[in-house]
Amino acid sequence: MSLLKPKLSPEVADALASGGAIVALESTIITHGMPYPANLETALGVEAVVRENGAVPATIAVIDGELRAGLERDELEKLAQAKGVVKASGRDLAVAMVRGQTAGTTVSATMLLADLAGIDIFATGGVGGVHRGAEQTFDISADLTELGRTKTAVVCAGVKSILDIAKTLEYLETQRVPVIAYGTEDFPAFFTRQSGYKADHRLDTAEEIARAMFLHHQLGTGTGLLIANPIPEAAALTHDFIDGTIADAVREAEERGIGRKELTPFLLARINELSKGESLKANIELVRNNARLAAKMAVAYAALKKQ
Ligand code: PSU
Ligand code: MN
């Protein structure tokens, strides 16, 4: 049985055919991670940043049941305003196809589809992880198991402290996923440049990260890589400001009994409200920053593959 491939935009198809640099982008951040119109502006802005840095953007989603890599502007506009869109992790894709649904793809689903398309690098804001209280709820994002089985390098700004960061790092260790911090020893916590935990590894250039990716795959590890890129200093929030807000949002979710796939979108929306939009501003900046690094990695990686 042959493997499916997502339908490629002409630009992405050209780049793949010529061995050019491509950066995959996810769409749950558009459908469930940010409010309209900030989600659309961010999606368009991130694509522009990828292009400015020499790579082709491939936003991944399911549109009317069709797997897609590379969306046109009007499709992004529709996705950003659509109501009742599915949040699809890798396990939800087949049913979304059968039902003809439109879905935002999580990190897990985006990695899977990027890999099927032949795209090696993917930029996002934050990945899912082990939720606080997971010892009771068992709530561990499929993003982490996907990283343990799919060969995509994911550039993120670390994980938010809506998650149990220590357990998330432990889980990635179990899954044989290297966690590489860019230009720092610290594992960043999304809104802040430090989480209180160290990353496993530090590399200081996009070229070095691309070489590490190349070798990681040549070793037949079969796993992805997590690249943690700290939010730019000027956009970072202070621990004092954001930690209380996150704690309030987590408590509220618990009180209201929110769980499973609704939990992360609820927390993101609540943190945005409680922070009066400060978290959203930081979120936009860090995603752009990740797109920049991912594009530079993609340029370096494309050159390595041609050697
Ligand atoms: N964290 C964020 N922003 C996001 C997400 C996580 O800061 O948009 C989204 C991503 O698409 C991620 C998904 O893959 O949430 C994880 O959801 P869950 O925790 O339900 O696995
Ligand atoms: Mn979950």
Image: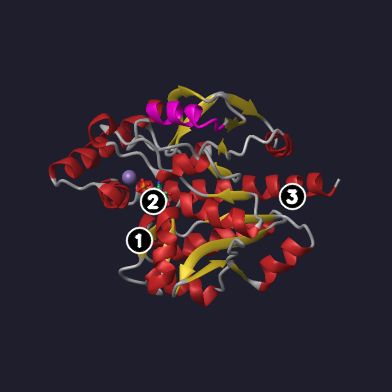
Q: Position of residue 245 (x, y in %)?
A: 26, 39
Q: Secondary structure at mark 2?
A: helix
Question: Between marks 2 and 3, how big is the CA–CA gap?
Answer: 29 Å
Q: Position of residue 163 (x, y in %)?
A: 34, 35
Highlighted range, magenta: 167-177
Rendered-image quadrant of the N terminus: bottom right
Q: Quadrant of residue 52?
A: bottom right
Give the answer, above or below, for where 175 lies relative to 35: above
Q: Amino acid at mark 3?
A: Val
Give the numbered dot on residue 241.
Answer: none
Q: Is residue 145 visible?
A: yes
Question: Between marks 3 and 1, how big is the CA–CA gap?
Answer: 31 Å
Give the numbered dot on residue 299.
Answer: 3
Q: Main secondary structure of the magenta part?
A: helix
Give the answer, above or below, for where 47 lies relative to 303: below
Q: Position of residue 257 (x, y in %)?
A: 16, 46
As drawn, is 155 to the left or to the right of 127? right
Query: Which residue carries the number 2 mark?
Result: 280
Q: Residue furthest front?
A: 1
Q: Residues within 10 Å of mark 3 (few under 14, many from 20)?
A: many
**Residue drawn at x 74%, y 50% as measured from the top left:** 299
Q: Residue furthest left?
A: 255
Q: Amino acid at mark 2?
A: Leu
**Is there CB contact under 8 Å for labels 3 and 1?**
no
Query: Which residue carries the number 1 mark?
Result: 35
Give the answer, above or below, for where 272 lies relative to 134: below
Q: Nearer the viewer, residue 51 or 224?
A: 224
Q: Amino acid at mark 1?
A: Pro
**Residue drawn at x 48%, y 59% as measured from the top left:** 42
